Image (cartoon, rainbow, N blue to C red):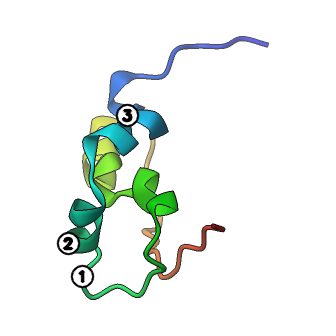
Amino acid sequence: MLTLPLPSFLLSPARSESRRAFAEADLDARMTGIEWGRSDAFLDEHPDAYKDIDVVMEDAADLVSVDHTLRQIVNVKGD
C-alpha cells in the first residue's frame, strides 16, 4: 500500500490543539442559534477547528470536480 502525505490544504488542527486553542465561551458564541448539548466534550468540534470546505475544494480544483453540493443538517456526537 502506498501512503502519501496529505497536502497542507487538507490538514486541520489536531483535536488536542483545538482543545488548547478554543475555550468553552468561544464555542458557546459560535453555536448561537444552534441546538447542542453544552459540554467540553464538544470543544474539539469547534467550527473554527475545520478548514472552510469552499477553500479546500477550490484548492483541490485540479484534483476533483464538484457534481453535487451537500449541506449538513445534523451532527451527532456521543458524550
Q: Of the residues shown, which amino acid type is indicated by label 3?
A: Glu
Position of 52 relative to 76 (above/below): above
26 to 72, vertically: above or below: above
Q: Quadrant of residue 56?
A: top left
Q: Residue at x 42, y 68 (%)?
A: 69
**21 sits left or right of 15 in the view:** left
Mark 3 lies on residue: 17
Label 2 secondary element: helix
**Residue 44 appears in the picture as rendered:** yes
Badge 3 density bin: few <14, some 14–19, many ≥20, Cα 10 Å:
few
> Which residue position holds label 1?
32
- Residue 57 at what x, y percent from top left? 34, 46
Query: Where residue 26 sits: x, y (%)?
Result: 22, 61
Left or right: where 3 falls relative to 75: right
The first of marks 3 and 2 along the sequence is 3
Which residue lies under the disc numbered 2? Answer: 29
Residue pictured at 43% horizontal, 49% vertical: 65
Residue type at the position of mark 2: Ala
Residue at image point 38% right, 44% down: 19
3 or 1: tag closer to the N-terminus? 3
